[in-house]
């Protein structure tokens, strides 16, 4: 279900009063990737706990702050950590920060995550440009009431009921990201991201099934934000850090500590890539 308009209004008013009034680009930072926010100039932050109706992330590696600042002359608003369905919160809370970003004026969203490598050629530490996704969460964030208007008065309303998902991950942005990666000497894989609810990791049989479906990586986030972004008319770029080989491919049992450690080791690389991409926008 989409965020309620009263909640969006109250959260947006708080962010405008205490953090920033406008932004051009939104960034969602996944597990262990919060260091990118340190690159922002004139940065200011606001804990989620101080913003009305915002979800508090309970997952290690998610700072739980909204950060504003500039980079290469662009105004950014950054989610330093996110909430997940497996934390027991609904879509309306997960997507509320994105509604606020849209109210601040963003036209582009860059979303990042940590994923497990389903493609057997992927190795922990690889960076993957998301070309498409498969929604295996069993739900869609657009289910529920809809007034069919992207904008009505001062607030973004529910957005499109039936957004076209054939170009969910903008082709021009993907080309730009590949160019930025080449210029910075960063190898960037490409692949399809499959989303599940979690929080348990996948069984070997599930991983084999996902590979058959055409997935290259699997994770527990991102797809709800992308679907909602498309309904709001935003351009989207997605990036995954391959934190581990998925179950059945890895030589040892998976732990969240191992995932967070691997992603943290790649935080400088993905921060450099994000900065290079933003410079080109």
Image (cartoon, rainbow, N blue to C red):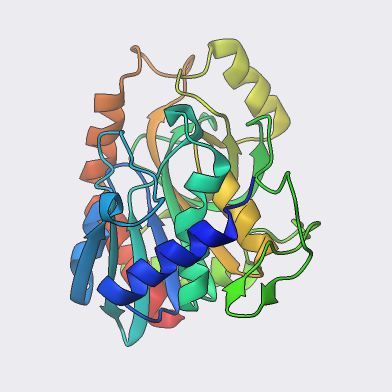
Q: In the rendering, at what x and y percent does residue 262 appear?
A: 26, 36
Residue ID at (81%, 57%): 162
Q: In the rendering, at what x and y percent does residue 66 appear?
A: 30, 60
Q: In the rendering, at what x and y percent does residue 207 appear?
A: 58, 20
Is 248 located above or below residue 271 in the figure?
above
In this rendering, position of residue 262 left or right of residue 250: left
Q: Quadrant of the N terminus?
A: top right
**Outermost residue, bottom side:** 73
Is 162 located above or below residue 219 in the figure?
below
To which quarter of the image does residue 274 belong?
Answer: bottom left
Closer-to-camera residue (162/2): 2
In this rendering, position of residue 239 left or right of residue 58: right
Q: In the rendering, at what x and y percent does residue 155 appear?
A: 58, 73
Residue ID at (50%, 40%): 221
Q: Is residue 54 visible?
A: yes
Q: Is residue 222 visible?
A: no
Residue ID at (28%, 80%): 70
Residue ID at (61%, 17%): 206
Give the number of callouts: 0
Closer-to-camera residue (5/240): 5
Is 156 located above or below residue 253 in the figure?
below
Closer-to-camera residue (124/56): 56
In this rendering, position of residue 166 left or right of residue 111: right
């Amino acid at each position: 279900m989409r965020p309620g308009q009263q909640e969006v209004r109250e959260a947006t008013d708080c962010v405008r009063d205490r953090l920033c009034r406008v932004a051009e680009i939104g960034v969602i930072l996944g597990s262990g990737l919060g260091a990118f926010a340190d690159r922002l100039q004139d940065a200011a932050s606001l804990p989620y706990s101080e913003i009305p109706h915002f979800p508090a992330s309970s997952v290690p590696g998610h700072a739980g702050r909204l950060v504003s600042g500039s980079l290469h002359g662009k105004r950014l608003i950054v989610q330093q950590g996110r909430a997940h369905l497996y934390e027991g919160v609904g879509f309306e809370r997960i997507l509320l920060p994105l509604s606020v970003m849209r109210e601040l004026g963003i036209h582009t969203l860059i979303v990042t995550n940590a994923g497990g490598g389903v493609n057997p050629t992927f190795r922990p530490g690889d960076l993957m440009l998301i070309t498409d996704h498969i929604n295996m969460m069993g739900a869609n964030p657009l289910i529920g009431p809809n007034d069919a208007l992207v904008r009505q008065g001062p607030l973004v309303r529910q957005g499109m009921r039936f957004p076209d998902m054939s170009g969910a991950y903008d082709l021009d942005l993907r080309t730009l990201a590949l160019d930025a990666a080449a210029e910075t000497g960063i190898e960037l894989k490409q692949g399809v991201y499959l989303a599940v609810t979690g929080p348990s990791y996948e069984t070997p049989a599930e991983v084999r099934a996902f590979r058959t479906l055409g997935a290259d990586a699997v994770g527990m986030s991102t797809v709800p934000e992308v679907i909602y972004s498309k309904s709001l008319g935003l351009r989207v770029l997605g990036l995954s850090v391959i934190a581990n080989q998925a179950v059945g491919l890895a030589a040892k049992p998976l732990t969240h500590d191992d995932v967070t450690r691997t992603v943290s080791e790649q935080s400088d690389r993905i921060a450099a890539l994000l900065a290079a991409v933003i410079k080109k926008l």
